[in-house]
Image: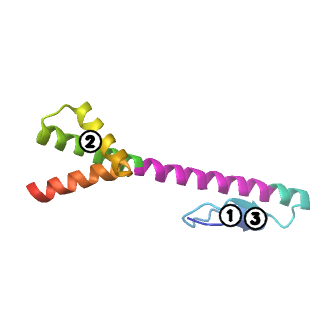
């Protein structure tokens, strides 16, 4: 991810040509712009950059939660099979174990699944 906004300084003629760099700049600045117009273009580009950064961070969090959910579902299935308990009881077990060990429920679930796969794999 780019850490700074990217602006394209170009002439009006060059702006009409299609340039495919594999990413879009956050803003376009023309030499003919007034100081006020450049200031607005820079502010707008910064806003676009911050919005994209926020979306990427949110996407990463969602992917992490989805991966964690997969581990939890697998661990519940393992606990249901091994302990002969219901899914709700398996989830309660995972939650209590996570609180007791002061770890995330996803980490506890991943450990259970990995140990089960190691023993039964």
Tag in front: 2 or 3: 2
Asked which quadrant contains residue 24, the reply is bottom right
* Residue at the disc numbered 2: 73
> Where does the N terminus fall, quadrant-wise?
bottom right
Give left or right: position of 45 versus 32: left
Viewer-nearest residue: 22 or 40:
40
Mark 3 nearby-residue class (10 Å; few <14, some 14–19, many ≥20): few
Magenta part of the chain: 41-64
Disc 2 element? helix
Viewer-nearest residue: 15 or 55:
55
In the image, residue 104 sits, relative to residue 96, either above or below, namely: below
Mark 1–mark 2 Cα distance, whole angstroms, equals: 40 Å
- Name the spot of residue 59 as percent of width and height, x first: 49, 50
* Residue at the disc numbered 1: 5
Q: Residue at x 32, y 41 (%)?
A: 96
Viewer-nearest residue: 21 or 40:
40
Q: Is residue 13 magenta?
A: no
Mark 2 nearby-residue class (10 Å; few <14, some 14–19, many ≥20): some
Q: What is the number of the mark on residue 13?
A: 3
Mark 1 nearby-residue class (10 Å; few <14, some 14–19, many ≥20): some
Give left or right: position of 114 versus 62: left
């Amino acid at each position: 991810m780019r850490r700074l906004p990217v602006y394209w300084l170009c002439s009006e003629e060059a702006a009409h040509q299609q340039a495919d760099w594999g990413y879009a700049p956050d803003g376009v600045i023309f030499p003919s712009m007034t100081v006020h117009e450049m200031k607005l273009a820079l502010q707008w580009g910064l806003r676009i950059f911050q919005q994209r950064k926020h979306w990427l961070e949110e996407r990463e969090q969602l992917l992490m939660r989805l991966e964690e959910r997969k581990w939890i579902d697998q661990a519940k299935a393992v606990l249901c099979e091994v302990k002969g308990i219901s899914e709700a009881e398996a989830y309660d077990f995972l939650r209590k174990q996570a609180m007791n060990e002061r770890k995330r429920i996803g980490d506890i679930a991943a450990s259970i699944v990995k140990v089960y796969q190691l023993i039964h794999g």
